[in-house]
Amino acid sequence: NAGVTQTPKFQVLKTGQSMTLQCAQDMNHEYMSWYRQDPGMGLRLIHYSVGAGITDQGEVPNGYNVSRSTTEDFPLRLLSAAPSQTSVYFCASSYYVGGSMNTEAFFGQGTRLTVV
Amino acid sequence: TQLLEQSPQFLSIQEGENLTVYCNSSSVFSSLQWYRQEPGEGPVLLVTVVTGGEVKKLKRLTFQFGDARKDSSLHITAAQPGDTGLYLCAGAGPGYALNFGKGTSLLVTP
């Protein structure tokens, strides 16, 4: 009963380092998305995907890359980490329930990233 | 991107009290969802409202969607410490992703 799995749970990076945050879902959902959560800011959309091979930018995409080669996996890459990217990152997968934009999203437990 | 405003930002109450949190937008929601997030966890969907004037109940939680579909409220009756968490409203974003409000942080003390 895995749902959405994010790894790692915690990470400390030095400024300028790169890394990949992993996200995998086992529910065969078409839609996946990445969010960052900062104190007092709610969750902000970084990138999203509506299916394998299709990705697009959200509200705060700068400094992040994504790819979606399979339905199950949606990794988020930080190209050159900056202290401003210190945040908690959540991956979600969702499916279309029906009606007007009615989807149900399932979230991973998050990755807490600190850039020093 | 549709702007969702939540109020209050913080709420600290004692067990047994009632409370209401609000989610407002200047534009019409196609649908609206409420999520609860506990510390160290991802958000979990509580309810989806779609029809103007709709009321949904989930045990002690009552969700209401405004007639004009521009606002929603979450009312908790007789709050318990287990209700502590961050309550987030969300509307439809691009590509079936979500557009979140900033959340209401609720603390219920025994």
Image (spheres, coloured by chain):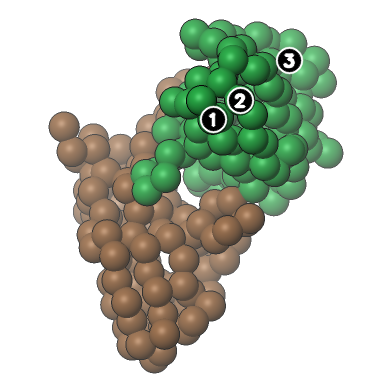
Chain colours: A brown, B green
The Cα–Cα distance between marks 2 and 3, rounded to whole angstroms, is: 32 Å
Query: Callout 1: residue from which chain?
Result: B
> Mark 1: which amino acid?
Thr
The Cα–Cα distance between marks 1 and 3, rounded to whole angstroms, is: 34 Å
**Image quadrant occupied by the N terminus of chain A:** top left
Q: Secondary structure at mark 3?
A: loop
Front tag of 1 and 3: 1
Front tag of 2 and 3: 2
When the figure is inspected, residue B57 is found, relative to residue A63, above or below; the finding is above
Do the residues bearing badges 1 and 2 touch, measured as CB atoms within 8 Å?
yes
When the figure is inspected, residue A116 is found, relative to residue B63, above or below; the finding is below
Residue at x-position 64% and y-position 35%: B12
> Mark 3: which amino acid?
Gly
Please identify the residue farthest to the left as the structure is shown. Answer: A1
Residue, disc 3: B52
Q: Which mark is residue B14?
A: 2
> How far across and how far down the image is residue A17, in percent?
33, 88
- Local crowd size for mark 3, using a 10 Å CA cut-off: few (<14), some (14–19), many (≥20): some
The Cα–Cα distance between marks 1 and 2, rounded to whole angstroms, is: 5 Å
Q: Secondary structure at mark 1?
A: strand
Do the residues bearing badges 2 and 3 touch, measured as CB atoms within 8 Å?
no
> How far across and how far down the image is residue B19, in percent?
68, 22
Residue, disc 1: B109
